[in-house]
Amino acid sequence: MTEGDGAPTGGTPRRPRLDDVFRPRFARWVTGTLGCVVALATVLLLVLLPGTGLVGFALGDRIGIGLVGFAIVWFCWRQATVRAVPGPDGLRVRNLATTRTVPWAQIVWVRFGEGRPWVQLELDDGDSLAVMGVQRSDGERARQEARRLATLVQVRQRTGPAA
């Protein structure tokens, strides 16, 4: 039996299948934890702030604090949910700001050289697309995931969308 990220519920982690979802581990853990801390701190701050008066905070101040807290939590949630989902017709890449589906035939090269914080896809139109679902902060696992993605691209281009 496995959990949603492909890790077994007990014992050693299994090897990912070729078409499993690509997700970072370290960034998900850090931003998920940070988002929870900021959400809790924002709620506590809003509850514990003194009310209106000479030293108190007015409704506008509280709304501003709540909006800043919400923006930070949203950013953390978005970062924690970056991923790349292989499908029969292409790779759906969800990054921090955008989501894009790239057909397998459009991917020319998968790059993950030194100095790159995440995998880059070189596309046939000369553009490149970051795949934040594979991040260097995951160390050796990131290198394995980059190789898995490169292999997946080769297999999908060779066999076509029906595979």
Image (cartoon, rainbow, N blue to C red):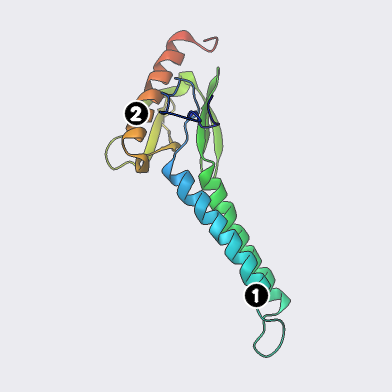
Whether residue 48 sits left or right of residue 108 in the image: it is right
Q: Residue at x 64, y 64 (%)?
A: 67
Give the camera-side residue of 128 and 74: 74
Residue positioned most to the front: 10
Which of the two labelled residues, at mark 2 and mark 1, occupies the earlier sequence position?
1
The correct choice, above or below, for 57 with respect to 106 in the image is below
Q: How many marks?
A: 2
Quarter of the image for residue 119 reads top left
10 Å crowding of disc 2: few (<14), some (14-19), many (20+): some
Residue positioned most to the left: 114
Q: Which residue is mark 1?
A: 48
Give the camera-side residue of 80 and 117: 80
Q: Which residue is mark 2?
A: 144
Residue 15, horizontal then vertical, whole percent: 41, 23
Q: Secondary structure at mark 1?
A: helix
Whether residue 66 sits left or right of residue 153 in the image: it is right
Query: Amino acid under label 1?
Result: Leu
Residue 85, horizontal then vertical, whole percent: 53, 28
Q: Residue at x 42, y 44 (%)?
A: 26
Whether residue 156 sits left or right of residue 136 in the image: it is right
Query: Amino acid under label 2?
Result: Gln
